[in-house]
Amino acid sequence: MAGGIDINCDMGESFGAYQLGRDQEVMDYISSANIACGWHAGDPMVMEQTVRLAKERGVAVGAHFGYPDLMGFGRRQMDLTVHEIENYMLYQMGALYAFTRAHNVHFQHVKAHGALGNLAFVDMESSRAIARAALRFSKDIILVVYTATLMVPVAKEMGVRFVEEVYADRIYNPDGTLQSRKVPGSVIHDPEKAARQALSSVQEGYVVAHDGTKVSVRPQSLCVHGDSPSALSILQKIREELRKASIAVKPMGL
């Protein structure tokens, strides 16, 4: 991304009486919000509140679509056909679009969540289904793809508008995929460590995998997970280090 970097974060993941994340505080440190669409998290009331909050804070809005798995937070693999994946994605995008249109907010991007995103790392046809759904919805929408995975060549092949992202708060495998959350230490909670990974990816073009391998990356957006208890402190540290490096933060669509 010329002249700056986007910071995206998963938002709107509360459900009914259950509160998750610190959206009010986190929103001040990001430039793009991935809003849950009611299947892995979120509900119509939360979606409404989150779109309104993003508009108030000047944060760009996108859909965070996932498996229909509220109980498992979308982190359990499901046996779906590519046709189902495509239509499930369209359904969730349509739900969020209703709220963005109601608030006169631009619908900037889409991003796969959890186990569905992990599948797209390694499964060509699932990646194609996701890119196809994005194109069917709008030729202008941005698809967030995971750098150093096959989602990148698939996005190029399909002709979808896309940006590549790096996770600041996750440990990588040598092949560019994310180390499973089942492995202790796979989620980074130390703000200093997360900021180092963010800066090395932006300035040096690599992240260090769990075995010490340097994985080449081309980040246009940095992601921090909003449900992490250390999300706010990680974002504050990343913004501090980006400011020191004179790297501007702006939405991925700019």
Image (cartoon, rainbow, N blue to C red):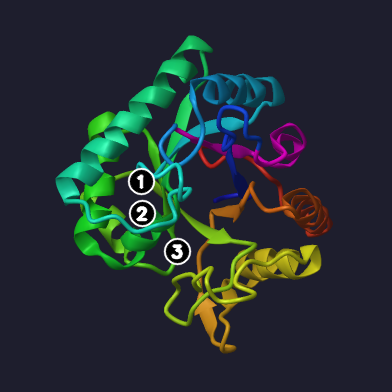
Give the labeled residue for mark 3. 147
Give the labeled residue for mark 1. 67
- Residue at the (59%, 88%) spot, across then down: 212
Above or below for 25 versus 196: above
Measured Cα–Cα span from mark 3 to mark 1: 22 Å
- Residue at the (49%, 27%) spot, across then down: 43
Task: Give the mark nearest the N terminus, 3 or 1.
Answer: 1
In which quadrant will I find the C terminus?
top right
Q: How many marks?
A: 3
Task: Give the mark nearest the N terminus, 2 or 1.
Answer: 1
Measured Cα–Cα span from mark 2 to mark 1: 6 Å
Q: Camera-side residue: 224 or 165?
A: 224
Give the amino acid type for the residue marked by disc 2 in the picture. Leu
Give the amino acid type for the residue marked by disc 1 in the picture. Tyr
Residue range of the region highlighted in magenta in the rendering: 20-37
Q: Are marks 3 and 1 in contact (CB under 8 Å)?
A: no
Mark 2 or 3, closer to the camera: 2
Picture coordinates of residue 115, whole percent (x, y): 39, 57
